[in-house]
Image: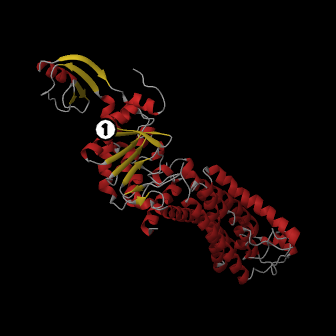
Amino acid sequence: MSVLKVAHIFSYYFIGFYRSRSFYFLLFIVTFAGSLLTYLSLKYFLNYHGLPIFQNFPASVLSPEMVLGYIWTFVGSYVPVFAAVFFGSSAISGELENKTAYSVFPLPVSRTSIFTGKYLASLVAGLMIVLFYYAFAVVNYTIVFHTVDVNTFLQSIALSILFLGAMLSLTFLISSIFNRATYAYVTVFLIYFLIFTALNYVIQILYRTFPFYLLSNTSTIISRIFFNFNPYDLISLPSVSPVSSGTVLLYAAVMISYMAVAYFTGLFIFQDKEVK
Amino acid sequence: MILTGLIRPSEGHVEINGHDCWTDHTGATVGVGAIVEQPEFHPYMTGREILAFNARIRGIEPEGAIKRVAAQTEIAGYIDRRSGGYSRGMKQRLALAAALISDPEILILDEPTFGLDPLGMILIRNTIKRVSKISRKLVILSTHLISEASELADRILIFSFGSIVVDIPSSQGKRMVIEVEGDLGNFAFKGVAAQGNLLYYNDSSSGSLNDLFSTIIGNGLKIKSVSSEYTLEEIYSKAQGGTIHG
């Protein structure tokens, strides 16, 4: 694998992503979600004492900073999912379906370089969307509380990037299997929203253990660093404290594992894939 | 497809300059430019950006190379437009420009004129002729258009079910056989072979058929009969299991 060729592949595909309709559609979705949450933040959190949740949990126990940070980052944990699906699902399958593979794959560049360059381009394009969303969150948080919890937001952003990387690896793996982008899109959504969700509840009901290793569950760490409420967990009791750093590291390790295993499996499949 | 590393041979292996096309695709395609089927390009990229990408991947400076291939393939007029708006002919020309960007030793062209209008076909064919005849590059052309093969190729291979069934110089499909009465002993006409009382004329012979007839008569010989050998279409038909007519 040549680093220079990876850089050329990266810049070529990144420009393509940046100009694509998918990119602007995602920006629109994120802007829409951000606008809804901005309305919520500015209408209700500027004077949070009237909110029903703070009648049950006084602000001294459950701080409004925690709640608002949680809400923004919980919704934000879906941004990497959509970014990965939009940029990653067509990565290989789309090239075959649209016949662009015929103009790129015969070039004297290894499949590893193509895969890596495209992965990095998708990662940076997705990162731009994620950071755009976080900019919304931080601005709102600052307007409401006149300060920002820099450390927690930075942790949340770092975990979002890891999650984006893991999701992209998964989508690249699925994309390497199929010859049609639509199949890849549908399969990733099915795996993430249907299979992972079903497995989550089946495992909890049958084995009384929370399967944190399912990627959809792992992503909850992005918001649980504000306060430890996991809507998918039927076993543990919610806590008004943030999750422990040990849990954060464990979840980060799960994301890195997904990223590495799915990336190399996808690469292995792609290297052996014939373009017919 | 096998030569460009897109598919794996079902058996055996194919090498270019000692590099296996499947296991060492990068090494095999260094000196190779290719058009595979009907190539598509990323619609948000301009022709210039696509050519620059091809040049950079091949480790060459894009600016001069783009200028050269744009002139060769006559794409300068729309090179700065996004390829999503290109017609089939424009895409095919861009594909040829991309294939020529590194001035490759070998040009692999898979149906390069498929779906093109007559003017587009002429342009592509003329460019191929320039590359193969003037630049002396090896051009491997895959086509179902026999007239195209006949016009462009020096050597024609006909495949049937993956095996070569015909391997002939292209001129063979255009050979005229002229039977004469009289002694051909000292007869000479450039490019015309004489055997017994038969003269074999083909397109690569230097003079026209009329010149040949005049020379025959001028030598005191008499033309007994003129017939053509199998055309390429007939050879192809026979190779595919059909019958040869006429």
Residue A94: % across, % down: 57, 51
- Say above or below: B197 vs B59: above
Residue B165: % across, % down: 43, 39
Q: Is residue A8 left or right of residue B218?
A: right
- Say above or below: A74 vs A273: below
Is residue A68 among what the camera can see? no
Q: Which residue is mark 1?
A: B126
Q: Which amino acid type is marked by label 1?
A: Asn
Q: Please name whichever residue, A31 or B43, is drawn nearer the observer in this view of the structure.
A: B43
Is residue A37 among what the camera can see? yes
Q: Is residue A39 left or right of residue B188?
A: right
In the structure shown, which secondary structural element does the residue marked by tag 1 occupy? helix
Which residue lies at the image location 26% right of the left edge and 30% below the top edge? B203
Residue B163: % across, % down: 47, 43
Which residue lies at the image location 30% right of the left edge and 51% below the top edge? B67
Chain at numbered mark 1: B
Residue A272 found in image quarter: bottom right
Q: How is the image coloured?
A: secondary structure
- Say above or below: B62 vs A212: above
Residue A71: % across, % down: 74, 68
- Say above or below: B196 vs A209: above
**Mark 1 nearby-residue class (10 Å; few <14, some 14–19, many ≥20):** some
Q: Is residue A135 left or right of residue B223?
A: right
Q: Where is the C terminus of chain B found, in terms of image quarters?
A: top left
Residue B15 found in image quarter: bottom left
Residue B123 found in image quarter: top left
How many dots with numbers? Answer: 1
Q: Please name whichever residue, B115 or B226, is drawn nearer the observer in this view of the structure.
A: B226
Which residue lies at the image location 65% right of the left edge and 75% below the top edge? A153
